[in-house]
Image: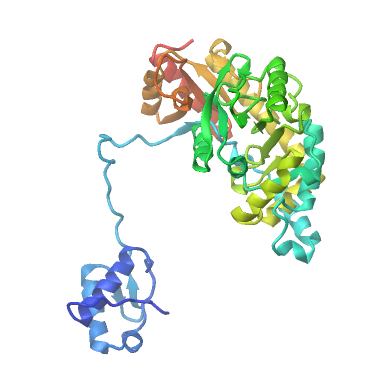
Amino acid sequence: MDLHLAVAAGGGRRAGLERALRDAVRNGRLAPGERLPATRQLAEELGVSRNTVKAAYDQLVAEGYLTARQGSGTRVAALPPVETGPPPGTGEPARALRFDLRPGSPDVGAFPAAAWLRALRAAIARAPSPAYDYGDPRGRIELRTALSGYLGRARGVAAPPEHIVITSGYVQGLALLTRVLDGGPVAMEDPGLPFHRDVVRRHGGAVVPLEVDGRGACLPPGDCAAVVVTPAHQYPTGVTLHPERRRALTEWARARGGLIVEDDYDGEFRYDRQPVGALQGMAPGQVAYLGTASKTLGPALRLGWMVLPPHLVDAVADAKLHSDHHTEVLGQLALAELIDSHAYDRHVRSCRLRYRRRRDLLLDRLGAHRVRGIAAGLHALVEVDDEERVLARAEGYGLAVGRLADHWHTPGGDRPQGLVVGYGTPREGAYREALEVLARALDEAGLGH
């Protein structure tokens, strides 16, 4: 065992050795239970006397950093956890979180582990040896081909494999596009996800608010280089982009040479009518379509895709090359196998039924008159008059929900209020109880139905 100790100068060799060992234990470099070298061995490695090492060990045993037992040698002691109070200015510690109805994540407990394992085994068995080398920054051709067929039939996307770039999730795709646009103004929905606005800003884009009303996103200002929209199920209001707005948006892009970035984050999960096709199908030359496996399978996979207009493919592929070279390959091959075997379709159908049942339970418990954005997706907007009052009640019960106020570009003002309730996250056994707690918080805040 090589401790790589830097014996500090000052105070003598023994004191320096004590400080080096003490610091290594405190910062976790020496883990609890780790056996230290014998005194003779460490003395030889450090060029000190054995008595110096023994004295340092004895001192640290006395302080509780080390333990010594006959026949077991000297080991690192398990230190008690450091007690920390609430952050300054927060007052009482936050109550423990019992129920999570925040939006943004699927039920990861429904991940198809057995199907994924079969797909991974089959993919590895078929993978040629070059698959384990550096590859095409656009991604493996197996996955791009599989996605071409799937996106065409499931989302109405015109997706030839040569126009697809595989990414490590939606965020990377948005960042790559922002870099390629080279700092032009980007219109983003208001309200919308603040984190996505931060991604655009961090990669050089100037964010412009894009109004959203009952028909979805409005037209962007004329000087914008691009517009980012969620047409199938606007986040967080849940409205579907009206057909007239879809036509107007594509006409804007054609007339001004602008780019539409379509975030199809949960388009597979539509419950009350036939799926709304992707906007990209209306204007493949003006729309960059972005999708991921994060909502259908799980965010941990870090698998996303972009279907790009032809003139952007090379520039985005080059940006991807200089970002991380290419996305992890085995996951790509496994997803391709999952799609080709139709196990992916079966999983999506199963999830769609599960989430529709959860959506229906939400409507039954809270009342359909106050819940918006229910036709699709994994979240709904619950209209309230006083967000803060409801959130205070919910926090008291250990319930976390999203709030509409966090999604506006500019906080404050006389804006609509609401709770953004995600029904994908809770496990099956906890969901009904979470709804009861939410209903109780609304009732106690005087906002129950």
Can residue 443 be seen? yes
Above or below 449: residue 230? below
Q: Coloring scheme of the render?
A: rainbow
- Answer whether residue 77 is visible to the viewer in this image: no
Viewer-proximal residue, 50 or 224? 224
Q: Position of residue 310 (x, y in %)?
A: 76, 41
Q: Residue at x 72, y 22 (%)?
A: 251
Quadrant containing the N terminus is bottom left
Q: Is residue 344 above or below residue 430?
A: below
**Residue 194: x %, y % from top left:** 49, 32
Left or right, 444 with respect to 319, comes to left
Q: What is the x, y in percent for residue 151?
A: 77, 36
Q: Residue at x 68, y 47 (%)?
A: 315
Estimate the x, y position of residue 111 in percent, counting from the top left: 65, 43
- Count of marks overlaid on the render: 0
Q: Check the image and report above or below for 108 versus 337.
A: above
Name the residue rendered at 59%, 40% in the picture: 178
Image vertical order of residue 110 relative to residue 10, above or below: above
Residue drawn at x 62%, y 18% is 216
Picture quadrant of residue 105: top right
For residue 140, side relative to residue 409 (left or right): right
Q: Is residue 85 left or right of residue 306?
A: left
Front residue of 130 and 98: 130
- Given residues 325 and 421, the one toward you in this image is 325
